[in-house]
């Protein structure tokens, strides 16, 4: 059997090119974020200074002060936290119970329901805009929190069910049988046995759901009317007025809007990666 001999010089060049590619990719992804961050500490005039400067002599918290002292802008953040939190909570509860049912029980139309759940994920959200708008208006939920919560759950639940089903499939059924021998019910098996040891999968689903609900723009714009119901992405867009753009405040709100998702990911990174890896093993 012939062996392929690799020359040391070629290996070094490949490694060098890979490192260069990774550095260029990091710069391409990181420079816009860095520009957003430093621009949030500038005035509108300094942002458009020519030639452009990444760092300026002046350093001001004026944009952050304007955002955090404006009750209307603070309301945008409150709305986003409330909607994203409730969507995450409801999605986790329903996703855990549905995933447990799909993993542990056989019932009629199980395969059909699985195909339907997967099919929902394959539909572009924009194609459902008009039907959902008509449904929300018919249910008299327009311009309410429930309009956003129920709509977001349509897109977060399929992912949650698929992930939790896959995660529960990796857990041995002997755990269920041991509890049933001792007289335990299905609810005890789920909430006292499987849920505590499924924390990585639950965290990964929760972080993904919160990120999706926090950053959603299209339905938040369509299903709300008044500023009291707007979320952070809509609040950023509203800073683009007819005659002037508050660029520094837009950058400040973007930074503040990115912090919750960043903090969540940093806190639960280990669980998030573990849950994504384990949950994708079985379906």
Image: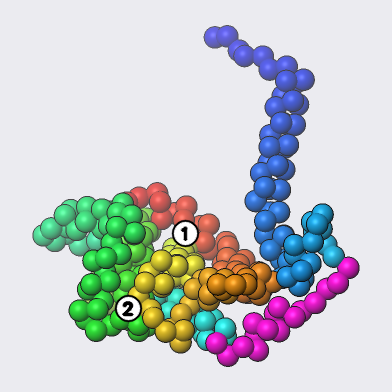
Where does the N terminus fall, quadrant-wise?
top right
Residue at the image point whose x is 57% and y is 83% from the top: 73
Alpha-carbon neighbours of circle 2 within 10 Å: few (<14), some, or many (≥20)? Answer: many
Residue 264 in sight from this viewpoint:
no
Alpha-carbon neighbours of circle 1 within 10 Å: few (<14), some, or many (≥20)? Answer: many
Q: Quadrant of residue 98?
A: bottom left
Residue at the image point whose x is 30% and y is 64% from the top: 129
Label 1 vs label 2, nearer the camera: 2
Q: Name the secondary structure under disc 2.
A: helix
Q: Position of residue 212 (x, y in %)?
A: 45, 65
- Location of mark 2 (residue): 147
Q: Position of residue 56 (x, y in %)?
A: 85, 65
Task: Classify 10 as above or below 163.
Answer: above
Whichever of callouts 1 and 2 sits on the residue coming sooner in the sequence is 2
Res 275 label: 1
Q: Which residues are magenta?
A: 57-72
Q: Name the secondary structure under disc 1.
A: helix
Q: Residue furthest left?
A: 108
Residue 231 colored magenta?
no
Q: Quadrant of residue 87?
A: bottom left
Task: Classify 276 as above or below 248.
Answer: above
């Amino acid at each position: 059997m012939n062996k392929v001999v690799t020359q040391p010089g070629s290996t070094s060049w490949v490694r060098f090119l890979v490192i260069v590619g990774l550095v260029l990719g990091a710069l391409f992804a990181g420079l816009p974020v860095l520009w957003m961050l430093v621009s949030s500490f500038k005035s509108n005039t300094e942002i458009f200074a020519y030639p452009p400067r990444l760092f300026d002599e002046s350093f001001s918290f004026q944009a952050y002060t304007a955002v955090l002292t404006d009750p209307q802008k603070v309301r945008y953040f409150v709305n986003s936290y409330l909607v994203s939190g409730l969507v995450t909570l409801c999605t986790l509860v329903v996703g855990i119970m549905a995933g447990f049912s799909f993993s542990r029980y056989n019932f009629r139309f199980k395969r059909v329901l699985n195909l339907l759940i997967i099919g929902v994920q394959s539909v572009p959200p924009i194609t459902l805009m008009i039907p959902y708008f008509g449904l929300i208006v018919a249910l008299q939920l327009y311009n309410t929190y429930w309009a956003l919560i129920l709509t977001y759950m349509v897109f977060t639940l399929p992912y949650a069910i698929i992930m939790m089903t896959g995660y529960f499939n990796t857990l041995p059924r002997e755990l269920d049988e041991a509890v049933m021998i001792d007289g335990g019910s299905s609810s005890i098996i789920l909430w006292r046995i499987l849920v505590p040891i499924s924390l990585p999968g639950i965290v990964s689903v929760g972080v993904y759901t919160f990120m999706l609900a926090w950053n959603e723009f299209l339905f938040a714009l369509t299903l709300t009317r008044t500023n009291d119901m707007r979320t952070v992405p809509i609040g950023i867009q509203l800073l683009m007025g007819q005659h002037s753009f508050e660029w520094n405040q837009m950058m400040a709100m973007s930074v503040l809007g990115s912090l919750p998702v960043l903090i969540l990911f940093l806190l639960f990174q280990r669980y998030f990666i573990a849950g994504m890896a384990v949950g994708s093993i079985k379906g």
